[in-house]
Amino acid sequence: MSLFNVYPLFDITPVKAKDVFVYDDIGTEYLDLYGGHAVISIGHSHPQYVSAISNQVSELGFYSNSIQNPLQLQLANKLEVLSGCKDYQLFLCNSGAEANENALKLASFHNQKHKVLAFHNSFHGRTSAAVAATDNPKVVAPLNAQQDVDFVALGDLMAVENILKQNETCAVIIESIQGVGGLDESTTEFHQGLEVLCKKYNTALIADEVQSGFGRTGDFFAFQKHNITPDIISIAKGMGNGFPIGGILIHPNIKATFGMLGTTFGGNHLACVASLSVLKVIAAENLMDNAKIISAHFMEKVQSIPQIKTIKGRGLMLGLEFDFPISELRRTLIHKHHIFTGSSKNPNLLRILPPLTIQKKHIDRFFKALEIELKAKHTSF
């Protein structure tokens, strides 16, 4: 049986990884500045993480949500302390797309409305309502397109209000920093205005922190820079450092009823200990502070590269925009310099999403490689 061919693949086969490095089947070492789509938060194979999962699976790997699982409550309490999101409730699932599906469904249950408002260049997942709220027609099947979603420009409060005042929109869903779309973000004024409009028109405000959460921006959540209080916060990716887990944080103004949401694998014992170990390491190793320190160093290094048109993002969720497509540059960084980076919907943007354990010397290595290749590109004309 062959694999369903939906991914373009680099000819690299990782077999081992440690902290910020990945090793392939012939022993080549790669510097990981992409973290597998921002998933690797505390570094590959962190010993505390490995120990926690190993110990748990030797005792109990899984049982259903029809029984008590104290690990879920431990995770909720630790998450509340570290994130600062007081009095929210936690529902656990398996991925970012599933988190956003549950967020949108819950919003609709809460206010009995049916439409969704999202923003141009958004990406919220590849399933049902989440993919319908993703601004990319290529990944939206006719079945998904039956969902009723309005798209407006990021930052346009007037367009938002013109839609919300029709009293049909159950939720506004927003990435405080867009991921796949290309690292665009709006102002504090816009975010606070959005919160005001959502309250005025009884619409749930969903902060999609699937990629930007768990300390990646230097704050626990990217929206916290703007001093707003979302009704629902969706989380995944860095939450499990590679173990599949997602969830939503739910404001206490939204009430739970039996059967409203459900999951087979969500919040299982292994997932909970994986995420608990991530939170413990983030706190113990001051990784949010490290994200800010390394980001500042990164910004300094950018100044020496005149070919960089714009730098986008915050913390360790960064994008370097050039005035040319970066696909060939990215291939060269992988195959010649053995450095993983990422792409986005913006063909000229190189995405940088390393483990939060990254150090200045690793950033220096990246910029040295970048200088070499940009100089070679310039002299080839």
Image (cartoon, rainbow, N blue to C red):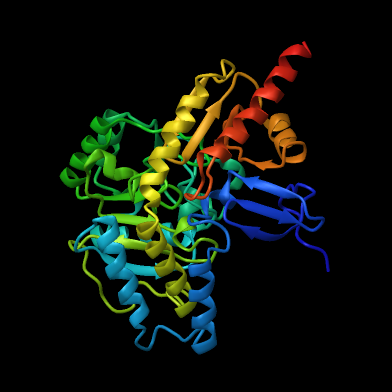
Q: Where does residue 193 sit, x and y in percent of width and height?
A: 21, 35
Q: Where does residue 29 sit, x and y in percent of width and height?
A: 72, 50
Numbered circles on residues, count:
0
Q: Residue at x 61, y 58 (%)?
A: 18
Residue 372 quadrant:
top right
The front one of 257 and 273 is: 273
Residue 48 appears in the picture as rendered: yes
Up-down: is 159 above or below 203?
above
Up-down: is 343 above or below 14?
above
Is 304 situated left or right of 155 in this image?
right
Q: Which residue is drawn at 42% across and 74% down?
A: 267
Up-down: is 360 above or below 70?
above
Q: Which residue is drawn at 46% across and 62% down?
A: 98
Q: In which quarter of the image is the C terminus?
A: top right
Q: Which residue is drawn at 55% across and 62% down?
A: 242
Q: Where does residue 363 sit, x and y in percent of width and height?
A: 55, 36
Is 211 situated left or right of 165 in this image?
right
Q: Where does residue 203 sit, x and y in percent of width and height?
A: 24, 49
Q: Quadrant of the N terminus?
A: bottom right
The front one of 99 and 243 is: 243
Residue 141 appears in the picture as rendered: no
